[in-house]
Amino acid sequence: MEKQTRARGEQVEQALVAIVDENTDAIEEYRGRGLVWGIEFRDKQRAGAIAKRAFELGLLIETSGPESEVVKLLPALTITADELDEGLRTLARAVRETA
């Protein structure tokens, strides 16, 4: 389980790096470990808009932070690589569509 969690965490980080690279002006930072990750947005309203759009696309994510400015990812420890890829693609789409 630990090895799988580490591999999935690396998968998430690679996807978030790509999202950050596409949105450097909008993202303050990303951070995380294992399967717990967050993306902090400069525009405090953006995280909520992303969470709403992701939900419309079939992905359940949360916001957090003092002003709900962070999109929080908490996938199940048992998630497969393919399921995680699908969710990360959906997240990237939600970020693009709320730009």
Image: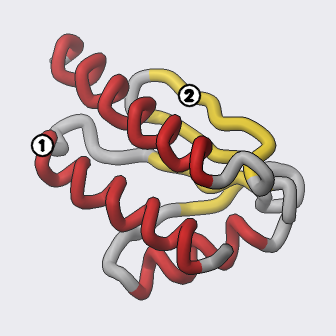
In the rendered structure, the answer to whether residue 55 lies left or right of residue 32 reads: left
Q: Nearer the viewer, residue 36 or 40?
A: 40
Up/down of 82 relative to 94, above or below: above
CA gap between label 1 and label 2 equals 19 Å
Residue 40: horizontal and vertical position, in percent?
A: 73, 47
Q: How packed is label 2: few (under 14 Cα within 10 Å), some, or many (20 or more)?
A: some
Amino acid type of the residue tagged 1 in the rendering = Thr
**Image point 78% across, 61% down: which residue?**
68
Coloration of the structure image? secondary structure
Of all residues shown, which one is farthest toward the top?
A: 3
Residue 47 percent location from the top left of the image: 69, 65
Q: Position of residue 4 (x, y in %)?
A: 17, 21
User: In screen coordinates, is 15 left or right of 39?
Assistant: left
From the viewer's perspective, tell me whether residue 31 is left or right of residue 1.
right
Residue 63 vs 18, above or below: the answer is: below
In front of the other: 35 or 54: 54
Q: For label 1, count other residues whose C-alpha is less than 10 Å away and answer few (under 14), some (14-19) or many (20+).
A: few
Q: Residue at x 17, y 53 (%)?
A: 83
Amino acid type, mark 2: Gly
Image quadrant in which the C terminus is located: bottom right
Quadrant of the image containing the N terminus: top left
Q: Image quarter for residue 81?
A: top left
SS at mark 1?
Answer: loop
Q: Which residue is mark 1?
A: 80
The residue under label 2 is: 32
Determine which quarter of the picture holds residue 96: bottom right
Toward the bottom, the furthest residue is: 56
Dot 2: what SS? strand
| Residue at 44% in and 31% down | 13
Number of numbered markers: 2
Q: Which mark is residue 67?
A: none
